[in-house]
Image (spheres, coloured by chain):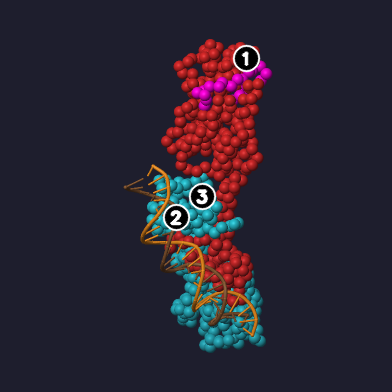
Chain colours: A cyan, B red, C brown, D orange
DNA sequence: GCGCTTTACGCTGCGCGTAAGTATC
DNA sequence: GATACTTACGCGCAGCGTAAAGCGC
């Protein structure tokens, strides 16, 4: 036959006998009766097509062919053990790699604590984070280059074919302006009241902007600037150039004496935080663990969000 | 468990399914019923401790752990096939190595044709030949550095502990002298008639000398020289310095117009050609084949010996 | 005769195939 | 409802252990 079956069991028996040179003791070491062990060796010899041991009642030793096979068997067993050990390391999350794609707002504000906890739990797992806009995040997942994504969608469900989308939660929006701005002490905030003021927008393809546009329509803001980064928004607002509206999860960037943040009690103004992964194909053990931590932390005490909200309102 | 059992069969099944991504077709390719194949995959998954395939009725694909295991499995199977193929090559004598130790007389005269035939039959097997005196040959065998030896012993059996000795045949002796020597035409040759003539001896530790001394005792030859090599004996004899007595198997060195060789019809003057190998431990397939050729050729038509005898007597 | 391997021989259970079940599209 | 994997189930045989037999020292 071209490729006979070979089991690690048989090779272990072979090596044991090669070492002990005694069927009885090798059988004991293998937890087999001596005849059973003998049969196992014979079946191996049949499989490989060569007598591997010279044996008479007084002496057992390798044949030249056996000596030839011994290092191969040793190597094969070592390689097998290495492969299985490596697999076990991944299953047990002692090794592994997780690639998350996430909106910049989540990547900078919400994820770091999660990553820190995950890292503490599974220090052997390497982490990668692509902090990109929603579409790019989802493309990474679709292409299999990220395990899952934390993205956003205004009100429309963004599940494309082959992707599985789960709503993690809803992010509300806050006004951000200078602390000495009139709006900082306005009694009841409405979008209409914001409209006249110079407004710092995020770029059109950002999830923040998309959600905002959807809620405003057809109302238009008094656009002063369009910028790419929330940090830039913060700088502009602090300098008194204008006001802006940002999601709750990004407020950590605006927590300064000079800036006021106020919740906008507008049900239609919100963005959904989505957890996106491929529909088919399970996550690796390491990715699944991080995935589960994400879900759990969004459901369970969202003390970070609550804390920030409370402080922003105070 | 530390080291679960793993069979090449299971890994082949794994790779087949990884490629075909379809249980039914993979089962066919493996010559198994689909449920049996399914069970085989499951048992592999249990053994390695990880789910290797994501499967639903519409789609089968590797899990991340399966993708991790795939190259390992491929490598393990390739290594196994290589090891088994190498072993088969040795068993079938497509590869191998044989180390023979042989007396110089045999190494130069009798073995070359045998080696040529062996080489033609098994061109992949490398040959080594140690052309040494009897004791050194036997030491090589005892030390496991030669597979077997073609040695000699006068009349005493030279089987040491752990060695197996077999008499291949008996080598008779011939007088060698110049063609114009008186002895070349002497009617009936006896040792006593040789004694007066200047005699070229081999060294004392040579088998030729040992056999000769044993047969002569207590008669002494008129020693002119002691030399190491038969070729030197030939030169001395041809130059007319003296006569000598050499085994039949070495006569090929003396086949010249200027030299006469005459069989000595003395039953007590002979040397036994021994085939020596270790008592325990079989020979490699390649060595066994050469061993068998040696035995067969010594038993079967010894046309070389006969031819030389006849010519020497003519 | 002793020690060790092989042979003999029931027996258990693994692993096979057939057939029914179930889930997914 | 068609397709493809899983479960159910009976069965044969590989492989086990016990016991007896060979065999080399």
Letter of the chain that mark 2 sits on in the rendering: A
Tell me the CA gap for discs 3 and 1: 59 Å
Q: Is A161 drawn above or below residue B290 in the view shown? A: below
Which quarter shows the C terminus of chain B?
top right
Letter of the chain that mark 1 sits on in the rendering: B
Residue A151 horizontal/vertical position (percent)? 58, 75
Q: How many marks?
A: 3
Q: Is residue B45 in view from this perspective?
A: no
Residue B118 horizontal/vertical position (percent)? 62, 39
Determine if the magenta segment contains residue B266: yes
Displayed quadrant of residue A226: bottom right
Letter of the chain that mark 3 sits on in the rendering: A
Residue topped by disc 1: B185
Is mark 2 in CB contact (under 8 Å) with mark 1? no
Q: Secondary structure at mark 2?
A: helix
Q: Nearer the viewer, residue B80 or B136?
A: B136
Residue topped by disc 3: A51
Q: Is B265 drawn above or below residue A5 in the view shown? A: above
Seen in the image, is B71 located left or right of residue A22? Answer: right
Same chain under badges 2 and 1? The reply is no
Q: Is A156 drawn above or below residue B96 in the view shown? A: below
Q: Secondary structure at mark 1?
A: helix
Range of magenta residues? B250-271
Residue topped by disc 2: A38
């Amino acid at each position: 036959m071209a490729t006979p079956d070979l089991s690690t069991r048989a090779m272990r028996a072979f090596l044991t006998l090669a070492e002990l040179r005694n069927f009885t003791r090798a059988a004991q070491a293998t937890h087999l009766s001596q005849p059973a062990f003998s049969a196992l060796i014979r079946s191996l010899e049949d499989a490989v097509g060569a007598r591997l041991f010279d044996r008479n009642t007084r002496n057992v030793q390798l044949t030249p062919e056996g000596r030839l096979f011994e290092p191969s068997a040793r190597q094969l067993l070592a390689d097998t053990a290495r492969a299985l050990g490596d697999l076990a390391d991944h299953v047990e999350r002692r090794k592994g790699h997780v690639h998350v794609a996430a909106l910049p707002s989540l990547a900078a504000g919400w994820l770091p604590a999660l990553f820190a906890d995950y890292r503490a739990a599974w220090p052997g797992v390497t982490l990668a984070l692509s902090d990109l806009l929603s579409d790019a995040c989802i493309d990474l997942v679709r292409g299999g280059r990220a395990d899952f994504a934390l993205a956003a969608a205004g009100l429309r469900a963004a599940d494309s074919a082959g992707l599985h989308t789960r709503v993690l939660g809803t992010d509300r929006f806050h006004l951000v302006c200078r602390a000495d701005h009139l709006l900082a002490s306005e009694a009841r905030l409405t979008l209409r009241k914001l409209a006249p003021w110079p407004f710092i927008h995020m770029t059109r393809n950002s999830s923040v902007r998309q959600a905002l546009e959807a809620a405003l329509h057809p109302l238009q803001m008094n656009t002063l600037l369009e910028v790419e980064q929330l940090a830039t928004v913060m700088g502009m607002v602090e300098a008194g150039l204008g006001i802006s509206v940002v999601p709750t999860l990004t407020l950590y960037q605006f927590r300064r004496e000079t800036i006021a943040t106020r919740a906008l009690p507008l049900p239609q103004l919100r963005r959904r935080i989505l957890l996106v992964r491929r529909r088919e194909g399970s996550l690796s053990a390491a990715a699944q663990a991080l995935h589960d931590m994400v879900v759990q932390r969004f459901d369970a005490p969202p003390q970070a969000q609550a804390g920030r909200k409370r402080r922003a309102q105070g």
